[in-house]
Amino acid sequence: MLYAVIPAGGSGTRLWPLSRAGHPKFLHPLTGTDASLLQATAERLAPLSGPEGTFVVTGVAHAAAVARQLVGVPEANILVEPSPRDSCAAIALAAAVIARRDPDAIMGSFAADHLIADTPGYVEVVRQAMAGAADGLLMTVGIQPTRPETGYGYLQCGGPIGDGGVLKVEEFKEKPAYDVAEAYVKSGNYLWNASMFVWKVEVFLTELARQQPQLHAGVQRIAAAWDGPEREEVLGEVWQTLPRISVDYAVMEGAAAAGKVGTVSGDFGWNDVGDFHTLGEVLSADVAGNVVLGSAGDEQNGVVLRDAEGLVIVPQSGRLVAALGVRDLIIVDTPDAVLVCPRDRAQEVKSIVDELKDRGDHHYV
């Protein structure tokens, strides 16, 4: 059995104004179905973990919505962090809580806001990673790159470990420049780092203690109080002292340098839905290449398109959205904000959120 941990945080600023701090992208149905990204994540992990083995680490503002969306997951499996401390604290808290319930557990960490096209293929690759974890490795699931992508980190792969398709991870690489990414892809020795991890909780916590002793001591103290009356007091005292650092930097890079990290390669239609342009590429389009989120794109669904191609339209306000004679645009209509921009500048939407914060317009963020 796998204990599947889903870190559910972040506000998805490149998907503004749909994704906001109070209702981030993982709570939205961006899957082409009625399921939210979070619900889709839990559903595809169900063959490995089931609801009883599914844990979500989320913030105070999102805990109620997470519970409403994942009605089968026990309330005790929704771990609420008082404030964001980046991925290492969230994942380490889950590992420490799970270890107290099952010291021999194998856990995996899977982001709440990714899309997977081939669920059976995904499940099989995670099973391969579980086999590597059972042998004592800190495992990652790498993605076979399809292009020189500058927006992802990479895993530099070495030779095989055993005969189960596991490769040694030599090094974690930062998001590269285009020419470097191109060289990575051509070499055939690199995978995209999708931040999917599988390990024995005991192995992970031992490595955490070696590299991040303060963080390890803190989450162990919190976990010891988790099922008792002192939880809130200890959590409030200790959580704010934990280092704010990603699990890649805190543990995985150092573990790879020590030869403790393996990977299995996945090719199951993975996408991290980072912006509206990407969303338009992965969801079904009409014959003109237009994608209308949550509808078939006709008049009955609040959208009228004439002589329009390659649009991504998100109608969320209840108003009619009409487009005539335009190409390759993003149009997001929400009750209090409208975004219009070219698809090739979708990555820059985050800069609008930054400007709104600088102006003090936090109610829009």
Image (cartoon, rainbow, N blue to C red):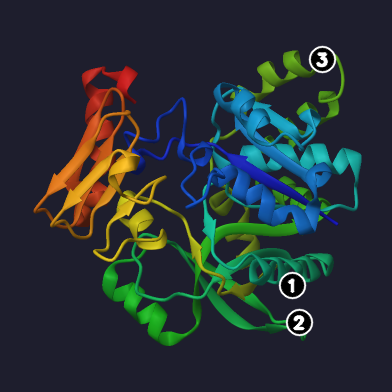
* 156 to 348, vertically: above or below: below
Q: Where does residue 149 sit, x and y in percent of width and height?
A: 35, 68
Which quadrant of the structure image shows residue 146?
bottom left
Q: Earlier in the sequence, mark 1 or mark 3?
A: 1
* 249 to 9, vertically: above or below: below
Label ID, residue 303:
none
Q: Amino acid at mark 2?
A: Gly
Q: CA distance from mark 2 to mark 1?
A: 7 Å
Q: Earlier in the sequence, mark 2 or mark 1?
A: 1
Q: Secondary structure at mark 3?
A: loop
Q: Where does residue 94 sit, x and y in percent of width and height?
A: 73, 40
Disc 1 target residue: 128
Q: Secondary structure at mark 2?
A: loop
* 317 to 139, vertically: above or below: above
Q: Amino acid at mark 3?
A: Glu
For the residues labelled 2 and 1, say whether their Cβ atoms are less than 8 Å apart.
Answer: yes
Disc 3 target residue: 230
Q: Residue at x 77, y 37 (%)?
A: 72
* 92 to 124, vertically: above or below: above
Q: CA distance from mark 2 to mark 3?
A: 44 Å
Seen from the viewer's position, the closer of residues 139 and 66 is 66
Q: Secondary structure at mark 1?
A: helix
Disc 2 target residue: 164
**336 left or right of 33?**
left
Q: Amino acid at mark 1?
A: Gln
Q: Residue at x 28, y 22 (%)?
A: 336
Q: Where the N terminus falls, by quadrant?
A: bottom right
Seen from the viewer's position, the closer of residues 265 and 167 is 265
For the residues labelled 2 and 3, say whether their Cβ atoms are less than 8 Å apart.
Answer: no
**340 left or right of 114?**
left
Q: Where the C terminus falls, by quadrant?
A: top left
